[in-house]
Image (cartoon, grey):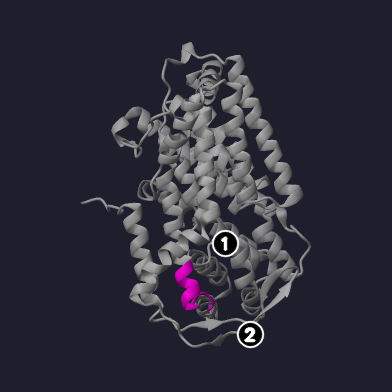
Amino acid sequence: MKKLKIPHALTLLFVIILLVSALTHIIPAGKFERVLMEGRNRVIPNSYGVIQSTPVSFFDIFKAIPLGFKTAVNIIFIVLAGGIMFGIMEKTQAIENAAGTLVKKLGNERRYLIVFLITFFYGFLGIFVGYEHNIAMVPLAAVLSIAIGGDLILAAGISVAAITVGFGLSPINPYTVGIGHKIAELPLFSGAALRTILCLLALGILALYNIQYLKKISNNPDKSLGKGLDENGIKLSKSISEYTITRDNYLVLFIFLIGLGVILWGVFQHNWYFIELSAVFLMIAIASGLVSRMNPTVFSETVLESVAKAAPGAFMVGFATTIKVLMDMSNISDTISFEMSNLLQGLPQYFAAVGMSISQGVINLFIPSGSGQALATLPVMIPLGEVLGLTRQTTILAFQIGDGVTNLVNPTLGGLIAMLSMCRVPLNRWFKFILPLVMIILVLSWTILTIATLINY
């Protein structure tokens, strides 16, 4: 039996762009009325109305591509800035020496323990720090993965997947659970115990999944999904026993940690986002070059080499954002939300909760922003859930599962594309690796969701 071949990431996204363009000619345009509350536009329930259709033309499809890049310019630049920072730090050998020394001290025989612990470490970053805020940490996983005999796919598994699962199923996610609780008029982050159990179980399954993958490729390197990916500047240049950390390396790592501290302070105290984070990344790069006494010409050449390596990922971010632009042009996002909610009516109570999470997963493709999706769908889904016999807490859990788990395979999610690009992992390879895990976590999540329905959570 011939294996299913997933097309190249660029081809896959272009097919989705064409599909969405076709849907704009089939799905009628519609809008919910919205009201501004606490600086955010919230949907008014039962306010959906059909408006004049604005299907995209053949020319609009290609016009949407540069508009997508314009919309995603902040994400595109943070990919480039992150690439520059990592490129300079890699040139100083600080990251390589730190990873090699860590493996030497722990012992390569403990590499499975390292994978387990690092998966949870990145998962906790997702839970407590956020999503795109962790982009600077992703390349470190690439170096560590190669050092313990893994590949770039494993690097994405222990970093990108863990951050995504941790953030998506976080019991204190401010963008999904926080906004959901405000809309549902529930105490903020109430019911955290069940969500914590789900999040930790999902991270545990991911850690074991990563360990199993490392065992598989260790026993048979031909089974590596990362074969042929560019490991230049990431793989170790000498044997583990030779590694040590120099004074300059410590200075570079110290600057990096200080930069992360500044980022966390800015994010939580001043609501920093992509522009501010990009600025800090560039400052870290320059400071790392200075303390390591890097030649200005070498520094400049390294910057351009790093941009060249980061460019494909940056391009994919802009290209993926084309889909959002097409949705905005055609005004079909609200129609999709309205029709998906209508499909749930009449379902038995236990199927309704699972069906709600599935519908949110579908909507997530068209509205990849967690907060945007919450504001667009929860004012509709919460009253519907009560009609179906679901508590408001269960409805929000269903929403979180639908949004959070499908983020692992959402090609329209700019943050996912950006972080995968930091590991140099294309979407088609990523899908081959992560799809089985997505199904496992969905089954776990739906089991928890059924329990929530049974106990009137």
Q: Which residue is mark 1?
A: 369
Left or right placement of residue 177 versus residue 370 in this view: right
- Dominant SS in magenta: helix
Q: How many marks?
A: 2
Tell me the number on the disc at residue 298: none
Label 2 environment density (alpha carbons within 10 Å; few <14, some 14–19, many ≥20): few
- Residue 437 location, x and y as percent? 45, 48
Dot 2: what SS? loop
Left or right placement of residue 192 versus residue 4 in this view: right
The verdict on residue 91 being magenta is no
Between 292 and 147, the one lying in front of the other is 292
The verdict on residue 330 being magenta is yes
**Residue flagged by tag 1: what amino acid is it?**
Ser
Label 1 environment density (alpha carbons within 10 Å; few <14, some 14–19, many ≥20): some
Dot 1: what SS? loop
- Residue 33 location, x and y as percent? 64, 82
**Contact flag, marks 2 and 1 (Cβ < 8 Å):** no
- Residue 93 location, x and y as percent? 51, 22
In the rendered image, the vertical position of residue 68 relative to residue 436, given as above or below:
below
Label whose residue precedes the other's in the sequence (2 or 1): 2
The mark lying in front, picked from 2 and 1, is 1
Quadrant where the image shows the C terminus: bottom right
Q: Which residue is mark 2?
A: 46
The magenta span reads: 325-334
x 57%, y 20%: residue: 293
Between 57 and 356, the one lying in front of the other is 57
Q: Quadrant of residue 318?
A: bottom left
